Image (cartoon, rainbow, N blue to C red):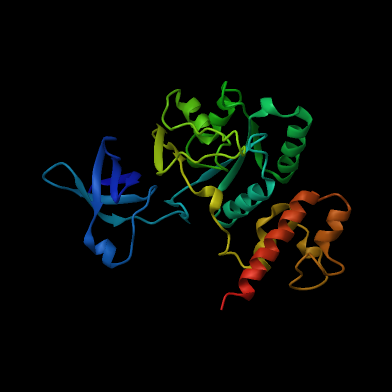
Amino acid sequence: MPKGLIISNISNVYEVENIENNSVIKCIPRGKLKKDDIIPVVGDNIEFEFQTDGTGVITKILERRSYIKRPKMSNITQMIFVVSMKMPKPDLLLLNKQLVFAEYNNIKSVICLNKIDLEDEAMIDDISKIYEKIGYKTIKTNAKIGEGVEELCKCLENNITAFSGNSGVGKSTLINNIFKDALTAEGEISSKNKRGKNTTTSITLYKINEKSYIADTPGFSTFDIYEIESKDLSNYFPDLSKYTEDCEFIGCTHIKECNCGVKKALEENKINIQRYESYCKLYNELKERELHRW
């Protein structure tokens, strides 16, 4: 049975790369998959059958390494979180939320600080140091002229990488620069409200080499982390989790309790205040949702 990789999905017609010869075949899923409530998504490794007209039918979805519900993708090994230094301004709460999501799904994270030509170097370095101290790789880029793109390319090797960030941060421009081609429509920033206009409407995997792909996707700026229980949230903040064993009380929320290892580390400047405030905000959001679950 031939095997392939789903590289795009438009109106439930899947483009599948045949791993035997790298040709691309248009496929539809077999009816049994629908009956079993299994929906193929971009990133799936699948088995398929050829039809007489040269198209194919997806017969089996192979085991997934990871699965993201919004936007629907599978087998992502790495996420590059693109943060704009200006127009739009950095949204570090969103970045922290995305990093939690990646930690939860066991996906490697890389932070890309883009549009570095628009902001003071000291501010950019301050943000970079926050995340490098935690252990996240941080790359500074100016996508318009290709600055930092070579370093970014090295991170893509042997990965299926998804780019994430608010509209207008420069995801599409970075991808175009990587390929030296206009693969994706570059978004324009509204001069009226300085917020991005999302121009990417479908998920597509772009092949770099035999084992490396990148994805330009809509929707990552709106995903949620509601699968995570509030009591477990600190596990996905690496800079907080290493101090939780120093808490006096089992089930410490690290917000109101006394003798809290996390709050003590915060007082000793071992944890960044902005990261801790993000934790508190996300914890309260999860807790509020849990209270109104039923």
Q: Nearer the viewer, residue 101 or 190?
A: 190
Q: What residue sits 66% from the left and 66% below the top? A: 232
Q: What residue sits 12% from the left and 43% below the top? A: 53
Task: Say which quarter of the image contains residue 190.
Answer: top right
Q: Quadrant of the C terminus?
A: bottom right
User: In the image, is residue 43 above or below residue 242?
Assistant: above
Q: In screen coordinates, is 169 left or right of 3? A: right
Q: In screen coordinates, is 270 left or right of 224? A: right
Q: What residue sits 71% from the left and 40% below the top? A: 132
- Numbered marks: total: 0
Q: Residue furthest front?
A: 192
Task: Say which quarter of the image contains residue 19.
Answer: top left
Q: In screen coordinates, is 71 left or right of 53? A: right
Percent coordinates x, y for residue 220 in the rendering: 52, 48
Percent coordinates x, y for residue 118 in the rendering: 68, 27
Q: Residue furthest bottom?
A: 294
Percent coordinates x, y for residue 282 in the rendering: 68, 60
Q: Nearer the viewer, residue 1 or 203?
A: 203
Q: Nearer the viewer, residue 159 or 112?
A: 112
Percent coordinates x, y for residue 188 in the rendering: 52, 32
User: In the image, is residue 271 above or below residue 183?
Assistant: below
Task: Say which quarter of the image contains residue 149.
Answer: top right
Q: What residue sits 71% from the left and 59% below the top? A: 281
Q: Residue furthest top?
A: 145
